[in-house]
């Protein structure tokens, strides 16, 4: 009887816990990428590869998107 209650409770909360773990992992990956990309050595290397030009080209579009979203 107690095992049935425990199993039902685990199944209901297990999905929530898995979702929180997944979202926490995604947040840590984004935070880690931000830390890596904020390093001056990495920025210089990305500039040599031409990735900086891509970011500069995308920035006006992103700002325009934020303005449209704020309307």
Image (cartoon, helix red, strand yellow):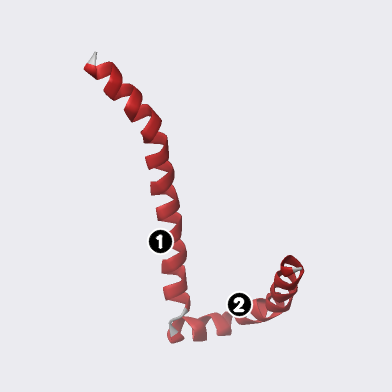
Please give the name of the residue rendered at 70% of the width and 70% of the height, measured from the top-left corner.
66
Tell me if residue 2 comes above or below residue 43 in the rendering.
Answer: above
- Could you say which is closer to the camera, residue 60 or residue 70? 70
- Image spot of residue 58 (x, y percent): 69, 74
**Number of the label disc, if any, that sits on residue 51:** 2
Against 32, is 21 above or below? above
For the N terminus, the quadrant is top left
Residue matched to label 1: 28
- Label drawn at residue 54: none
Q: Is residue 56 above or below residue 25?
A: below
Task: Please state the horizontal and vertical placement of residue 19, each as a whole percent of the image.
Answer: 44, 43
Residue 65, percent across and down? 73, 69
Secondary structure beneath label 1: helix
Task: Give the distance between the C-alpha atoms of the residues marked 2 and 1, in whole angstroms.
Answer: 23 Å
Q: Residues within 10 Å of mark 2 (few under 14, many from 20)?
A: some
Sequence-wise, the earlier of marks 2 and 1 is 1
Locate residue 25 relative to residue 66 in the image: left or right: left
Residue 27 in which image quadrant: bottom left
């Amino acid at each position: 009887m107690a095992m049935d209650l425990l199993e039902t409770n685990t199944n209901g909360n297990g999905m929530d816990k898995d979702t929180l773990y997944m979202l926490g992992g995604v947040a840590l990956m984004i935070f880690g990428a931000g830390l890596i990309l904020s390093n001056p050595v990495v920025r210089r290397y990305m500039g040599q590869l031409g990735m900086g030009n891509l970011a500069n080209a995308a920035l006006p579009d992103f700002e325009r998107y934020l303005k449209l979203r704020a309307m």
